[in-house]
Image (spheres, rainbow, N blue to C red):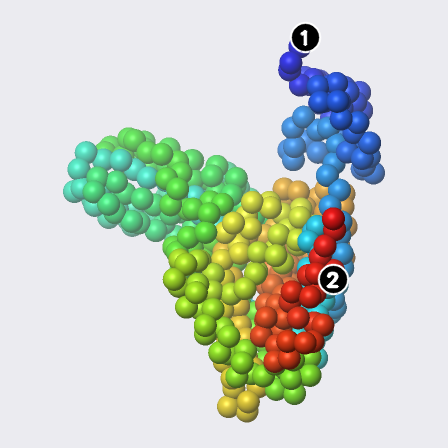
């Protein structure tokens, strides 16, 4: 019996070959693919997005909002599609959006934009490695020109250097337009490294990615340096709204965050906030982002303060928000529609989308903070009772 998954060298996305794979997996497993088989788009749009296409995973989408964003690229009310199977999640973000809207909206600022590929060059000794770093400074413009021959939108901004023994670790930092840019930077950096090999005699051995870019991994270097977009969302909630809508006080919220920061420090977490991964995972799945980028993008630095007026200020800085509005999965059928709901599909929209994503993450922080820092534990809005009521499906 042939154990190979059926495929076609002529058109691996045709109806016939897709049905052949469905029958194959049904025969191998005994499972009737009643739902996986059903989809509403032409599989002809899938080359470059998936191999062995067999069907779809239908993830429920809920809408939260409107969230009021006061950004430099996103301004006004936005209804946010969130794809999730976690009960209470959409309701929680909806509540956070209501509270921040009542407070005048969420201010969002993008302060940096960089995507990396991080090769390492290997030398005979430390002195050779050091001297290579000096040569890089003198040759940057030539290297930049070579890297940019591979892309119409990627721009090499800087080459960071980190010397250890006979190794010189580099981080090629690019801007990548409306694409996330991991593949783009890989191709550009390969071209640059090959040019370096042919123009600098000692630099003959390198590994294209040394793991110093920390792709798909949270890291301290990207918390400090930026990977993707560095975005800060902030809001000041008047004391009256804290008491009426969050069932707490600015003092209790500030104190609760102070206590949780110690927990974050002791655990070694790369995030001193509450749950930014929830917002980003649900938004990423809905809008065709690379879902694995949540591993980096969820990293966050939060700050909370009682203001002199007695109100509550909260900010979240996401230093490695990796998003796209063009390329990858963003052009697929339902994913494109979700981006269109936000007015964020296509070229020139990635900064707007990044601001909305950060604002959504902040709304979730405010809502969860409301649930775990309430004054009156008898209130039905309590975290445990909410999950018990809305988040059980057994």
What residue is at 49 percent from the left and 73 percent from the top?
A: 257
217 up-or-down from 67: above or below: above
Q: Position of residue 255 (x, y in %)?
A: 49, 78
Is residue 371 rendered to the left or right of residue 64? left
Residue 343 in view in this figure:
no
Q: Secondary structure at mark 1?
A: loop
Q: Secondary structure at mark 2?
A: helix
1 up-or-down from 130: above or below: above
Considering only order in the chain, which callout, 1 or 2, is on the residue closer to the N terminus? 1
180 up-or-down from 353: above or below: above
What residue is at 65 percent from the left and 87 percent from the top?
A: 240
Quickly name the residue at label 1. 1
Looking at the rendering, in which quadrant would you find the N terminus?
top right
Quickly name the residue at label 2. 389
Mark 1 surroundings within 10 Å by alpha-carbon count, few (fewer than 14), some (14 through 19), many (20 or more): few
Q: Position of residue 301 (x, y in %)?
A: 47, 65
What residue is at 48 percent from the left and 37 percent from the top?
A: 187
Q: Position of residue 164 (x, y in %)?
A: 24, 45
| Residue situated furthest top in the rendering | 1
For residue 230, the mark is: none
194 up-or-down from 143: above or below: above
Q: Position of residue 269 (x, y in %)?
A: 44, 58
Closer to the camera in the image, 145 or 232? 232
> Is label 2 or label 1 in front?
2
Dots 2, 1 in contact, CB < 8 A: no
Residue 318 in view in this figure:
yes
């Amino acid at each position: 019996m042939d154990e190979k998954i059926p495929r076609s060298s002529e058109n691996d996305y045709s109806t016939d070959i897709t049905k052949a794979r469905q029958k194959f997996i049904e025969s191998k497993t005994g499972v009737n693919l009643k739902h996986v088989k059903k989809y509403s788009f032409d599989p002809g749009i899938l080359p470059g997005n998936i191999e062995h296409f067999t069907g779809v995973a239908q993830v429920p989408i809920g809408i939260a909002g409107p969230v009021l964003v006061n950004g430099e690229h996103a301004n006004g009310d936005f209804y946010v599609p969130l794809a999730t199977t976690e009960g209470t999640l959409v309701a929680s973000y909806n509540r956070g959006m209501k509270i921040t809207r009542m407070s005048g909206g969420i201010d969002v600022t993008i302060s940096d934009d960089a995507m990396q590929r991080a090769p390492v060059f290997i030398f005979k000794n430390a002195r050779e490695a050091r001297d290579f770093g000096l040569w890089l400074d003198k040759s940057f413009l030539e290297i930049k020109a070579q890297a940019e021959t591979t892309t119409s939108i990627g721009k090499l901004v800087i080459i960071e250097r980190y010397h250890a023994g006979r190794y010189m670790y580099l981080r090629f930092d690019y801007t990548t337009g409306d694409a996330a840019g991991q593949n783009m930077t890989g191709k550009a950096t390969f071209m640059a490294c090959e040019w370096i090999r042919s123009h600098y005699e000692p630099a003959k051995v390198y590994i294209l990615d040394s793991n110093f870019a920390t792709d798909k991994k949270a890291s301290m270097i990207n918390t400090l340096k930026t990977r993707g977009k560095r975005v800060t969302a902030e809001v000041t909630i008047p004391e009256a709204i804290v008491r009426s809508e969050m069932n707490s006080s600015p003092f209790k919220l500030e104190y609760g965050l102070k206590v949780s920061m110690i927990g974050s420090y002791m655990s070694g977490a790369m995030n001193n906030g509450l749950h930014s991964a929830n917002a980003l995972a649900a938004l990423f799945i809905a809008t065709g982002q690379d879902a694995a980028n949540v591993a980096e993008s969820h990293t966050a630095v939060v700050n909370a303060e009682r203001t002199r007026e007695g109100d509550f200020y909260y900010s979240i800085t996401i230093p490695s928000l990796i998003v796209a509005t063009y390329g990858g999965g963003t052009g697929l059928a339902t994913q494109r529609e979700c981006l269109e709901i936000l007015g964020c599909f296509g070229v020139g929209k990635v900064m707007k989308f990044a601001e909305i994503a950060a604002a959504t993450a902040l709304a979730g922080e405010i809502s969860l903070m409301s649930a775990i820092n309430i004054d009156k534990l008898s209130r039905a809005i309590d975290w445990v009772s909410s999950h018990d009521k809305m988040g059980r499906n057994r």
